Image: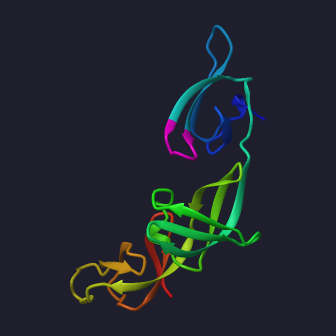
């Protein structure tokens, strides 16, 4: 159980039978009456944001969340199949469930999958992933006065990002999955 007075950004609670993450909160102590907490929460299944007010001593249960390491196997139409690294069970996701991860979805890579009540709800990619550049225009020296020039590049997953001029087709680059930016050539 977690008390409303102990809310922090990122706290996970069970609210109306579904898992929520506290996005923002404001603790208020009026001159008359008891203290209360106004919390903005994101539903971890649907992604919808909800705002509610709780008394500071009110206790809410913590959701039954588990993290599993799962390897991406293959895509069949708009269904993506993953294999649990511990139990060797296979789980499937539709395109809508993993839309945020699609630019970084590569076969045989291990992803972190969040389960709520033994049901997979979200997929998180590793922080950095190595991807092969499939298409990029040639970089021409002298295009810039400063030397910090970039050009667009398409990687094997279809994601387009800006890379330095010296990157060519066929190069393998490291990409930060938090913001989709180029890190280095591998």
The x and y percentages for residue 26 are 58, 29
Determine the residue positioned at 66% across, 9% down. Answer: 33
Relative height, residue 116 to residue 164 (above, below): above
- The quarter of the displayed image where residue 160 is located: bottom left
Q: Is residue 11 above or below residue 158?
A: above
Relative to 6, 108 lies left or right = left
Viewer-proximal residue among 47 and 31 = 47
Among all residues in the image, which is located at the extreme left? 143
Q: Nearer the viewer, residue 177 or 13?
A: 13
Above or below, comparing residue 62 to residue 186 in the picture: above
* 46 drawn magenta: yes
> What colour scheme does the image use?
rainbow
- The structure residue drawn at horizontal position 56% and vertical position 37%, both measured from the top left corner, is 41
Q: Which residues are magenta?
A: 42-49
Can the viewer see residue 131?
yes
Q: Is residue 124 above or below residue 129?
A: above
């Amino acid at each position: 159980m977690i008390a409303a007075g102990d809310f922090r950004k990122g706290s996970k609670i069970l609210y109306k039978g579904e898992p929520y993450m506290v996005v923002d909160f404001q603790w208020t102590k009026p001159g008359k009456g008891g203290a209360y907490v106004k919390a903005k929460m994101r539903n971890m299944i649907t992604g919808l944001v909800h705002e509610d007010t709780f008394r500071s001593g009110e206790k809410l249960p913590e959701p039954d969340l588990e993290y599993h390491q799962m390897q991406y196997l293959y895509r069949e139409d708009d269904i993506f199949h993953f294999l649990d690294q511990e139990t060797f069970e296979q789980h499937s996701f539709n395109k809508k469930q993993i839309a945020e991860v699609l630019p970084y979805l590569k076969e045989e890579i291990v992803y972190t999958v969040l389960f709520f009540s033994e049901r997979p709800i979200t997929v998180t990619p590793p922080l950095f992933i190595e991807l092969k550049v499939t298409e990029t225009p040639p970089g021409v020296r002298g295009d810039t006065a400063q030397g910090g020039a970039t050009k667009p590049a398409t990687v094997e997953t279809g994601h387009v990002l800006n890379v330095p001029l010296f990157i060519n087709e066929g190069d393998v680059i490291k990409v930060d999955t938090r913001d989709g930016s180029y890190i280095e050539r591998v």
